[in-house]
Image (cartoon, grey):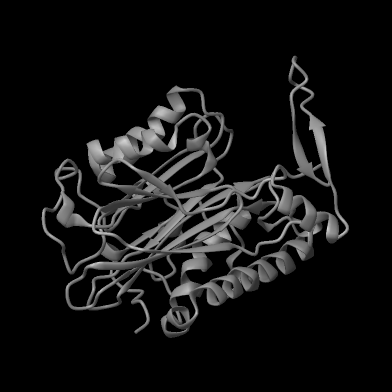
Amino acid sequence: MDADRGGLENRAVSGALELQTEAFPAPVDAHGGDPEALGALRDEMRWGEVSEDDKNETPDVASSGPIWHHASSIKGMRRSMEDRFDVLAPAIDESTLSFFAVFDGHAGGECADFLSKMLIDACSNDTESLLEDPEAFLKSRFLDLDDRFCDYAASTDHHDGSTAVLAVVEREPTTSTPMNLWVANTGDSRALVVRKSGTVKELSREHSPQDEEERMRIEDEGGFVKYVVNPFSAAGDGTLRVNGVLAMTRAFGNYSMKPFVTAEPDVARRKIRKDDAYICLASDGLNETVTDEEIGQYLLQFGAHKGAEKLSTLALERGSTDNITVLAAQLNPSLF
């Protein structure tokens, strides 16, 4: 059964959508295509989450309703907000699958905007094929969308790009018990599972020029990895960059960097355990200053809502220089 696109209570949609939507077929969405609603700030678009009055409360029984989740997304010290997120978390009688995604744009926000409107739609419109071969299906969807955006970007000379990290949670249809988790990631946004014991398991792989396999892949394609000194660093610090330009080896967009910078994701599967408490997706603005262990501690202590808010604030207070997005979803409500 395909995931239902209805109900505002089941859908969190990222804001600041300035992409020329006529360039792409518009997905069916919860706003009926209202551009004013689509352009609202993401912090005002958290349907399916706890209300302000109840934000400190956590349900103590597993529900057949949407998976409990919350996203906190702040601009931080950057001039513009290029992070985006999206959620499709239907009730169990509508679909056994829930989708959570975070996107971190660079050199502009158009690619992240496009992904926030299109990726979950593309992955949720054929759940039968998704469950037959999750890895092949997700890779195909990622690459197809990258081709579509790059065609648009080449015709309009837009050179921006974006990371993507997508989590798909499968629940047992009669009991709502979480069974399987798949994570597909392109770039350096991250996915973590937090266990009740405090153990944190990373399910994403950072696509960095420091990775020897990635460097060899780029060189095999005819590209190169070069150390570039930061001209604003008094100490002469720098970073490895693909063709001397991009500090990550995989991303959507960046059409002039193809094929060296691919959108092909790594896909990981985890059989959800009884003590798996949370899945957390985050842009690298969080991980600049906050450790995996701290992410686990905050979510276990404060829950998805307050934990996500406190983590994004903590990263900012510690001097994170990037946009910061934290999306947390509860995997086993019976633990709490």
Toward the top, the furthest residue is 234
Residue 240 occupies quadrant: top right
- The residue nearer to you, when weighing 182 against 150, is 182
Q: Is residue 41 visible?
A: no
Residue appearing at x 15%, y 62% in the figure: 62
Residue appearing at x 49%, y 29% in the figure: 289
Image spot of residue 333 (x, y percent): 19, 56
- The residue nearer to you, when weighing 191 against 90, is 191
Whether residue 195 is situated above or below residue 28 in the rendered picture: above
- The residue nearer to you, when weighing 289 against 111, is 289
Left or right side of 276 for 78: right
Left or right side of 185 for 272: left
Residue appearing at x 59%, y 68% in the figure: 142
Residue 271 occupies quadrant: bottom left
Left or right side of 61 for 92: right
Toward the right, the furthest residue is 222
Residue 110 occupies quadrant: bottom right
